[in-house]
Image: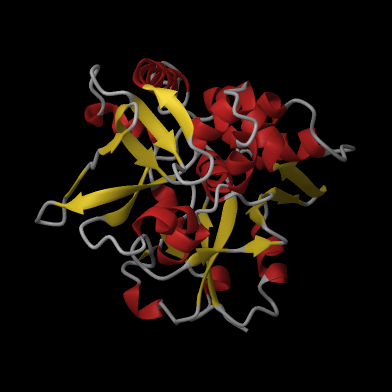
Amino acid sequence: MVKDMIDNVTNDNLKELLLKKKLTPELLMEIKTSFFIHPSKPAGDGKYQFTYSQDDDGENLHLYTSHEEYLKCHAEDNEVEPGFLYFNDLYDALYTEMNGIIINPSTDNFRIPVWLAYHIIEDIEENNETYENPYRPPHAFNDNNLLHKYCEGKKTFKQYPNLFSYLDASTLYTIICSDNNLDVYFTNGELEYKDKDVSFFKINSHYVLYSDMGLMEDDIENQEMYCYYVVADAVQIVKRVLEFDYEGILLKTPNGEFKLPRKLLLKHYESIIRKYVNREEQHFHALKLGGLDSCTN
């Protein structure tokens, strides 16, 4: 989405870990779940190709953790444009004779040899990339009562995989906002918002998940933007928290509000995705809140 693109790719947590110059388990998880910026060369028809840099130790691919870092090397380079990618998108660009990957060459200069890059990509594809289990029997995602009972009497959650088992069985919602009235783009009561200028609703740098629609209407009461709701995919929201370095998720239920901090979401990411079935992209369509013609106040 437009508002969550280049200026919002900061990777502050990743950059802080790069300073330690060691590939710790936490840094590895950051690399596996982050957006990177790469100097891509236009190849016509809206396509781009990877670019390689000849450094002292051989040929490398350069990645940047933010637009600011990118501009330190390419501010006046008109032959390339900043492109977005995940680390495992580099698979086809790697070859055994190259040296590897350098993250933020002008500052952190964090080097990942090509053999290690292959291992990281294999790890991503085995443990992070696909989280839908084809052998699990289908079930309805609408039993919010189980989630509400699980939340009773709790102030925080210690077992994140267990929590995501209950989120998996629930119907969750989130809000998207726009400066513009998007009602004209609705078709059959739904808005395909993927290419529209919208942003997910946040409270204090937390994305918000709701298990009750009435709680959403309370939150938009004083909003000056146009607001719509989405049947949420909780894991996709987790991914956005990790990609754009937000503080975490605020889970709102009739039993109270619960903060799910980014650090714990990152720590348990590989476990929680195994407890959750992909929502088959229904989260790309928004609906109107309360049946109103528009949802702004």
Compared to residue 122, the image places residue 2 above or below, namely below
Question: Where in the figure is residue 111, as x and y percent of width and height?
Answer: 45, 29
Question: Where in the figure is residue 155, as x and y percent of width and height?
Answer: 87, 40
Which residue shows up at 54% across the image and 39% down it? 235
**Colour scheme shown:** secondary structure
Compared to residue 246, the image places residue 76 above or below, namely below
Q: Quadrant of the N terminus?
A: bottom left
Q: How many marks?
A: 0
Q: Which of 157/141 is in front? A: 157
Q: Quadrant of the C terminus?
A: bottom right
Compared to residue 92, the image places residue 35 above or below, namely below
Quarter of the image for residue 195 reads bottom left
Q: Which of 55/39 is in front? A: 55
Question: Where in the figure is residue 226, as x and y percent of width and height?
Answer: 53, 78
Q: Which of 16/26 is in front? A: 16
Residue 169 visible? The answer is no
Residue 66 visible? The answer is yes
Which residue shows up at 23% across the image and 18% down it? 97
What is the residue that sits farthest to the left in this orientation?
Answer: 44
Quarter of the image for residue 196 reads bottom left
Is residue 110 shown left or right of residue 22? Answer: left
Question: Where in the figure is residue 159, as x and y percent of width and height?
Answer: 75, 25
Which residue shows up at 71% across the image and 51% down it? 250
Is residue 112 shown left or right of residue 220? Answer: left
Compared to residue 179, the image places residue 274 above or below, namely above
